[in-house]
Amino acid sequence: MAEAIDTDHLPRGDGAVLLANATLPSAVTAGILNHIGDGLGRADILIDKGEIAAIAPCGELIDHDGAARIDLDGGLVLPGMVDMHTHLDKGHIWARRPNPDGTFSGALEAVRSDREAHWSADDVRRRMAFALQCAHAQGTVLMRTHLDSIPPQDAISWDVFKDVRRDWADRIDLQASALFGVDSLEDPAFLPAIADRVAEAGGVLGAVTFMIDGLETHVEAMFRAAESRGLALDFHVDETADPNADSLRIIAETAIRTRFSGQVVCGHCCSLARQSDAAVDQTLDLVARAGIGVVSLPLCNMYLMDRLSGRTPRWRGVTLLHEMKARGIPVAVASDNTRDPFYAYGDLDMVEVYAQAVRILHLDHPSGDWIRAATSTPAALLGDGTRGRIDVGSPADLLVFRARNWNELIARPGGARTVLRGGRAISRTLPDYRELDDLMGT
Ligand SMILES: [Zn+2]
């Protein structure tokens, strides 16, 4: 992986370093920038004792005592990335359980059979660790994973998650949300049991919502279970082309009616893009009023939606991020699945996700503050407003690129990049797929 700067020039230990002539996105930077257009500005960044010590106009900090000076020559600097919707428990099973036809129903069945056959604690733990190595090397600092939580898998995966969260605490802040079909609530014993498990693990309550009889009752039960335990909520919502799927509206109405005090996140919301303008307006007004955040998963959605064998897809599968943002709804993009039946590809690289999101969702011309969707907005939705920003006093967790502007970054997202954690360059070596061969039966 090509580095953006000569990491041999970085000081060892806590020594200070001046990153001179950096290009920074003003939307996520607290400091004085010389604005150069399209949401970007130039500044020097002083790093001392692993923290961002100063951000100042170019040239002002040049005499800082003993700081090594690295001229970025306009290289772009981004904060450590935030990936708020992943599936680490499903990840990297493609080699043993591909999706036979690439469809959503094919994915559901393939994952179910793989889970029942293979998801021991050791299997889940090793694939999670592999995935986290990828995310860390790419520059992700904060992540939420969903965990399939149908018994008996819930007991296995939540215990593994707690171990993995502890093992990785010095590199990635990891959160987990429960995942199950909302029809699981037809068993009255199910919800209290999983909500207690989630609360005990410090997790988030979540489900897949789809249009079944009694959906309103089930959604309200989830809000009440979350409220009574102080949990946030994270739903998989309307991941379908069917315009009649409007569980997003039901979730928003329930949040308002129950005066829910926690953060609610809704992922996917694909069907919204298939509804009438009047229906969209009504639902988005409710979503804004309810304070719900929305995360789009553009790589996975474009892979799964509108897929029929032998027929070219006719729509992109993504939800209405521009319309949501215009209403003040917090919007984010994230990885979703990686190398599993829901998405055959992906490497937990939020720079790739952002670059693809820009292309798929037209987050450009101007780029403006859209970078918030991969940094500060998901951080806030995950309850950590200090992440996803470049602030004086924060850890120097930064991505440094040779690319000097949005165009150069989006055109070549795999271009030269250095990842700094606490001001030090980390290894960008990605784990080899061969490490998982024994789990794949190959
Ligand atoms: Zn998902």
Image: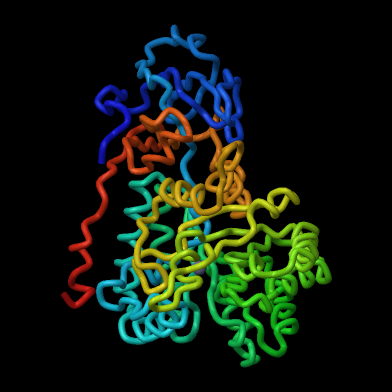
> Which one is in front, 82 or 164?
82
> Which one is in front, 321 or 365?
365
Q: Quadrant of residue 428?
A: top left
| Residue 250 % position (x, y) | 74, 74
Q: Quadrant of the N terminus?
A: top left
Residue at the top extreme? Answer: 63
Q: How many marks?
A: 0
| Residue 39 % position (x, y) | 59, 31
| Rendered image coloring scheme | rainbow
Residue at the left extreme? Answer: 442
Q: Residue at x 28, y 22 (%)?
A: 9
| Residue 343 % position (x, y) | 40, 68
Q: Residue at x 54, y 45 (%)?
A: 375
In this rendering, position of residue 59 left or right of residue 193: left
Give above or below for 366 relative to 349: above
Give above or below for 287 relative to 390: below
In this rendering, position of residue 58 left or right of residue 270: left
Q: Quadrant of residue 309?
A: bottom left
In this rendering, position of residue 377 left or right of residue 49: right
Q: Quadrant of the C terminus?
A: bottom left
Q: Residue at x 25, y 72 (%)?
A: 95
Q: Quadrant of residue 191?
A: bottom right
| Residue 341 % position (x, y) | 38, 74
Q: Residue at x 65, y 51 (%)?
A: 322
In this rendering, position of residue 96 left or right of residue 44: left
